[in-house]
Amino acid sequence: MYANVFDPVAFIFEGSACPLPDLQGERYLYNANGVPEFASGPKGTPIELAPENPDLDLGSRYTGITHKPKMIPGNPSYEITSFDFHQHEVDYQALRATRDTVQAFGMTLLESGQSIPFQYEGLVRARYEYGKWAAHQSPYLEPSRRRELLNWNPTDLEYHAFAHAFFSQDKSLPLVISVARWRPYVNEICLADLWVAPGDALVLPPKFFPAKPGENASADELRRRVVDLHGNRNAALACWFDGSRSTLMTETILANPIVMMDELTRPHYHEEVTGTRHRKLAEWQGDRFIADNSVFIPQCA
């Protein structure tokens, strides 16, 4: 008999989804140290959604990018957007999730002890366990290959017309959410990883593709039409830098199956197959990050 000395390759484990509660009054989302709670009015320190600001510009910028539709086989098949950044390798800038850095990607930072109006309907909450290999699995391959371990980490981003929230629940490691600000009418995109401190959360309002300005629009008008994208397959990125950890727990608020499938609200997925680099932001010690942008995530051999 041989002992099993190999660790399993963990991708994503999804817990049971629960609908959000119906409350009297205005529903608020409260962050109880990384755990979502709901109240019929402000609780703790109330905040508002960060205003949209298309002039904010953070992350690794790529210009001259192109995109085209791509059909994904399945039952049913569906269409995604296939990017081409025209690079040999794509870099995601590591950013600590602060009020300002998350606003640059259309999000709001909800710290522990804060609450925010959250009147959105058709949503559920669910726990997830992400493995550090989750980003090396692609949902856009043919069905027989979707459990395949890739030897690179491709770009996988989305936007959708329903609200979304990500809660950083691990006691020692940050949650990492990959983000992008795409400027489709000037062929430009900025990419980053937001490192969300334990106990913090990110709140995303519904997102929509911007209408194209008229023929006489200025270059500035074209550039200010943005699409904010996000992806959570790198949620356990910090585990790459902690030899004792291979998975990370988090909780997400997202759409129920009806909203997820509705043509008006469903996710719009975006892929770029070039291998990516994801930098280590910091070691987490107590209640602070120590900046360190010098280390990269290893790629599979």
Image (cartoon, helix red, strand yellow):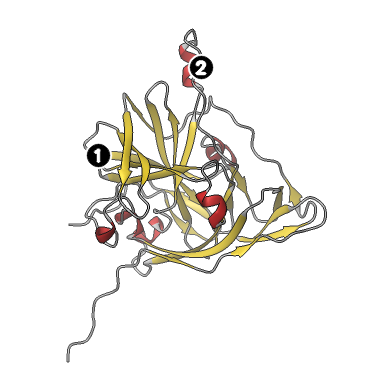
Which residue sits furthest front? Answer: 76
Q: Amino acid at mark 2?
A: Pro
Q: Residue at x 27, y 52 (%)?
A: 141
Q: Position of residue 56 (x, y in %)?
A: 52, 28
Rate crowding at label 2 as few (under 14), some (14 to 19) or many (20 or more) other CA atoms within 10 Å: few
Q: Amino acid at mark 1?
A: Glu
Q: Position of residue 165 (x, y in %)?
A: 57, 51
Q: Is residue 84 above or below residue 140?
A: above
In the image, taking residue 45 as reference, residue 19 lies left or right, namely: left
Indicate which disc residue 216 carries. none
Judge by depth and name the residue closer to the eye, 51 or 257: 257
Rate crowding at label 1 as few (under 14), some (14 to 19) or many (20 or more) other CA atoms within 10 Å: few
Q: Quadrant of residue 102?
A: top right
Q: Residue at x 71, y 51 (%)?
A: 115
Which residue sits furthest right? Answer: 25
Q: Is residue 229 above or below residue 171?
A: above
Tell me if I can see residue 166 in this picture: no
Q: Position of residue 238 (x, y in %)?
A: 40, 57
- SS for dot 1: loop
Q: Of the two numbered discs 2 and 1 on the same chain, state the one appearing first in sequence.
A: 1
Indicate which disc residue 89 carries. 1
Judge by depth and name the residue closer to the eye, 6 or 81: 81
Q: Which residue is mark 2?
A: 213
Q: Position of residue 36 (x, y in %)?
A: 64, 60
